[in-house]
Image (spheres, rainbow, N blue to C red):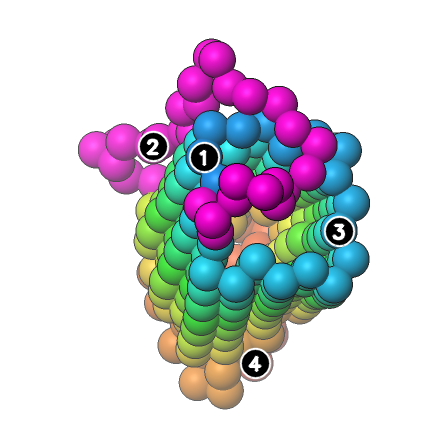
Amino acid sequence: MKENFIWKDPQLHKDILEMEDIVTENTEDEIYNLIIKNVEKIGDDFYKYEFVKVHFLNCKFEEVSFEKCWFKEIIFENCQFNHCSFKNTDLQIVKQINSLHRNTDFSDSTFHFVHFLECNMKYSNFNDCKINGFKSDKSDFNSTFFANSTIVHASLKKTSFCLADFFLTPLNKIDFSDSDIEGIVISENKSELKGIIVNSYQALELARMFGIIIK
């Protein structure tokens, strides 16, 4: 991440209201300034909802749709998502803490300042996404899909991308040296690797993809 790139974290109000449901009689597809705690939803549809300054805490979602939603200054903490959809969603200044995603679909979405801290994102779909400001600490992105996406201003620490699919996604200036990229999927001409930053061990592994034999 460039030194002149200023990171943004969610700034929630101190007098935030706590609720144990997302939708109330007063809800009109706009949810602001709330702690949403211990919610369990199955099969619900929040199409085009707007969430601003919301803290989701200990929530469980299964086959829930958040398609074309707008999330701004959001924290997901200790949440679980099973086969949920965030397709065509705009996520701005979003932090996920110790959250579990199973087959979550983020495809065709736009991210500005997204931070994953100790999250499990296995098999999630980030295809065709535009990501500006991507931070990950101690998270698992094994077997995820980042095909045909753009990623700029990334900060990765102790994160695993084993078998992740980066087909046609430029990895220029992304520092993977503190992460695991074993078995990543790229195109035949390997153009995705131009400008990638890796450690010496990773460089040896990537060299084998070019058919280079190192003695």
Q: Is residue 10 left or right of residue 166?
A: left
154 up-or-down from 88: above or below: above
Which comes before the other along the chain, label 4 or label 1? Answer: 1
Q: What is the crowding at mark 2: few (fewer than 14 residues within 10 Å), some, or many (at least 20)?
A: some
The residue wearing badge 1 is: 32
Q: What is the crowding at mark 3: few (fewer than 14 residues within 10 Å), some, or many (at least 20)?
A: some
Do the residues bearing badges 1 and 2 touch, measured as CB atoms within 8 Å? no
The residue wearing badge 2 is: 7
Do the residues bearing badges 1 and 3 touch, measured as CB atoms within 8 Å? no
Given the image, on which type of amino acid does mark 1 rest?
A: Tyr
Q: Quadrant of the N terminus?
A: top left
Q: Residue furthest front?
A: 25
Q: Which residues are magenta?
A: 1-30
Which mark identifies residue 211? 4
Which mark identifies residue 138? none
Given the image, on which type of amino acid does mark 2 rest?
A: Trp
- In the rendering, at what x and y percent does residue 118 appear? 67, 36
- How far apart in space, not on screen, are marks 2 and 3 (Cα)? 32 Å
